[in-house]
Amino acid sequence: MPSILLAAIYAAPIATAVIVIWLKSRKDKAVRMAAKARDIDGKVVIITGANCGIGYATVAELAKRGAVVVLACRNLATGQAALNQLSHDVYGNDKAASTGKLHLLRVDLNSLQSVQDFSREFKSQFDRLDMLINNAGIMGKGYALSTDGFEQHFAVNHLGHFYLTNLLMDMLKKTKGSRIINVSSGYYLKATSADFEDLTSVQSPSGFKPMQAYARSKLANCLHVVELCNRLKNEQVSVFALRPGFVRGTQLGRHFNQFLLTLATPLIWFFSKDVNQGIQTVLHCALADDKELESGALYNDCRKEEYSMLVSDDNARKLWNLSEQLVSSKVKQA
Ligand SMILES: NC(=O)c1ccc[n+]([C@@H]2O[C@H](COP(=O)([O-])OP(=O)(O)OC[C@H]3O[C@@H](n4cnc5c(N)ncnc54)[C@H](OP(=O)(O)O)[C@@H]3O)[C@@H](O)[C@H]2O)c1
């Protein structure tokens, strides 16, 4: 074989790798970082789904800035393990700094009763709530019903958070300058309908598509923010929806085929953000000054972004009414 051909065979993969790494580093540099201007020392924050992924990394950043954070987790064992690790990472051996800063309370968003129990417990321990971050979520799970008989993406990602937010509203209203942050997803753009009735019956919709159910639950997160904003016009409570981007290193893909996910690792690495990059828009909504944010808006890559056509006031009101009806049909109000 001529030596020039041999050289080309060896050089091609090396050149490809260099180009891929260069392109990836350019993509990484383009990720915007949060403003982090607000002082949140001593402010009380609840974050759902805080034991792993985006929730866990967000707690670490808020705790470093002095916030009192309540980890709202469905599994107390994994929640406690996360709290211990966070405590070690954030405060090290400084016992005084860590005292009273991180708390763990159980909430299973799949059960409205559990949401009610969480809210009661929180109110018995705290007298203010500066920030509620509705972060917990499931994706790509086959058809299954929540404890209350609703499709689980709808129940966990939307309805549980809807009820939680309503139950905590009195505390949010009385805490000046409080914020509600819904962690939605760019996947909401794939939702084909803003009609949620079929996800609220015990009948499996024919041809159920888990990713469509996820998309619609993430659309519901946006509609929830729009209606909250309309209802909170005369209150000092701001509300934001956000898209974190495609974030690797979380457990969101746990319902996918793990073999295929492993095969796709290089592609995922190339197209995704790491968790620190992935939490920047959450941190932006949590920590930017009021004047830099617009209540009711959607944020992506630390910037405001227009909603899709399905996010209308009309659809937001309809979903609110449906959600209220569903909750009141299942639970006695706290
Ligand atoms: N990762 C991404 O690329 C991406 C992109 C766009 C949007 N998002 C959104 O970001 C949020 C966080 O996702 P992630 O990527 O960090 O995923 P993750 O690592 O799987 O974290 C999800 C969290 O939600 C909790 N959770 C699930 N079901 C729950 C329930 N019934 N009650 C209470 N908590 C429950 C999980 O608790 P357990 O561990 O106990 O199950 C976990 O703590 C989700 O809302 C997701 O839709 C993520």
Image (cartoon, rainbow, N blue to C red):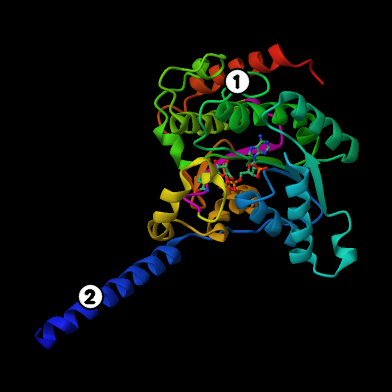
Q: Residue 150 carries which label?
A: 1
Q: Which mark is residue 12?
A: 2
Q: Which of 24 and 295 is in front in this view?
A: 24
Estimate the x, y position of residue 225 in percent, counting from the top left.
58, 32
Question: Label 1: how many residues lie within 10 Å, few (<14), some (14-19) or many (20+)?
Answer: many
Q: Quadrant of the N terminus?
A: bottom left
Residue at horizontal 63%, vertical 40%?
A: 136
State which region is magenta: 231-247
Q: What residue type is labelled 1?
A: Phe
Q: Is residue 232 in sight in this rendering?
A: no
Estimate the x, y position of residue 319 in percent, counting from the top left.
55, 20
Q: Is residue 172 above or below residue 12?
A: above
Residue 254 image-quadrant placement = top right
Q: Does the magenta stretch include residue 244?
A: yes
Spatial CA distance of label 1 from label 2 is 54 Å
Residue at horizontal 60%, vertical 48%?
A: 285
Estimate the x, y position of residue 199 in percent, counting from the top left.
53, 19
Residue 123 image-quadrant placement = top right
**Residue 300 appears left or right of 165:** left
* The image quadrant in which ligand 1 is located: top right
Question: Label 2: how many residues lie within 10 Å, few (<14), some (14-19) or many (20+)?
Answer: few
Residue at horizontal 54%, vertical 56%?
A: 249
